[in-house]
Amino acid sequence: MRSKLIAATAVLAAMTAFPAFAVDNGIYLGASIGQSGVDIDEAVSSGGDDFSADATGFKVIAGWRFLDWLSIEGNYVDLGSADERVDGDRFEVDASGLSLSAVGFLPIGPVDLFARVGAINWDADFSIEGIDLPSDDGTDLTYGVGAQFRVWGLSVRAEYELFDIEDANTVDLISLGVTWTFL
């Protein structure tokens, strides 16, 4: 009798814990912070040195997960101010933008693996030794992969995202963040 009571208690505990790991569909908000990287060949002039620098970047997240496996997500992305010496002068790039992506999820218990693809509308300001250069902007492809751990409406996520910006070899962001699903 005692073993049946223990087994029933274990089953009841497992059943009450299961909804905590169920996929939380709905509207979510969040933020993440991480390290951005910008690599540009011949940054200043033809034959010049390459620019390769890192900065602290962040993003603000808003999304709607309308299916267990699919959401639409918008982000404000700030890649920070990356600077490096190029041809002996201090060259600085300050980039940010708004992105819109489709995010596909593979839920595995309380963990989601995800991949994203979308577009970013970006602006970049450049300067050499504190002297402003003409800024640049555009709309380009963005894509990435990540994983998140969910408990109730709270998710902790790690993500790697690439921004396929013309005239730059690599613009990326690796970040750690949180989201909260509330509707």
Image (cartoon, rainbow, N blue to C red):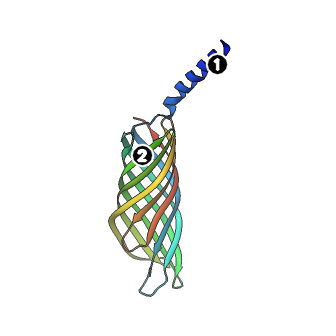
User: Which residue is at the front of the view, 131 or 144?
Assistant: 144
Q: Position of residue 133 (x, y in %)?
A: 40, 77
Q: Are marks 1 and 2 in contact (CB under 8 Å)?
A: no
- Residues under labels 1 and 2: Cα distance? 36 Å
Dot 1 crowding, Cα within 10 Å, few <14, some 14–19, many 20+: few
Above-or-below relation of 75 to 139: above
Q: Position of residue 114 (x, y in %)?
A: 44, 49
- The amino acid type found where label 2 is placed reads Phe
Residue sticking out furthest to the top = 1
**Picture residue at 51% right of the left edge, 32% below the top:** 20
In the picture, the quarter occupied by the C terminus is top left
Which SS class for mark 1? helix
Closer mark to the observer between disc 1 and disc 2: 1
Above-or-below relation of 135 to 3: below
**Picture residue at 48% right of the left edge, 80% below the top:** 50
Q: How many marks are shown on the rendered structure?
A: 2
Above-or-below relation of 48 to 93: below
- The amino acid type found where label 1 is placed reads Ile
Task: Report the side of 85 relative to 25 (left or right).
Answer: right
**Picture residue at 54% right of the left edge, 79% below the top:** 85
Task: Report the side of 158 relative to 118 (left or right).
Answer: right
Which residue is label 1 attached to?
A: 6
User: Which residue is at the front of the view, 28 or 67?
Assistant: 67
Dot 2 crowding, Cα within 10 Å, few <14, some 14–19, many 20+: many
Which SS class for mark 2? strand
Above-or-below relation of 46 to 65: below
Q: Position of residue 115 (x, y in %)?
A: 42, 52
Tag of residue 105: 2
Residue sticking out furthest to the left = 139
Q: Position of residue 71 (x, y in %)?
A: 37, 45
Name which of mark 1 and mark 2 comes first in the sequence. 1
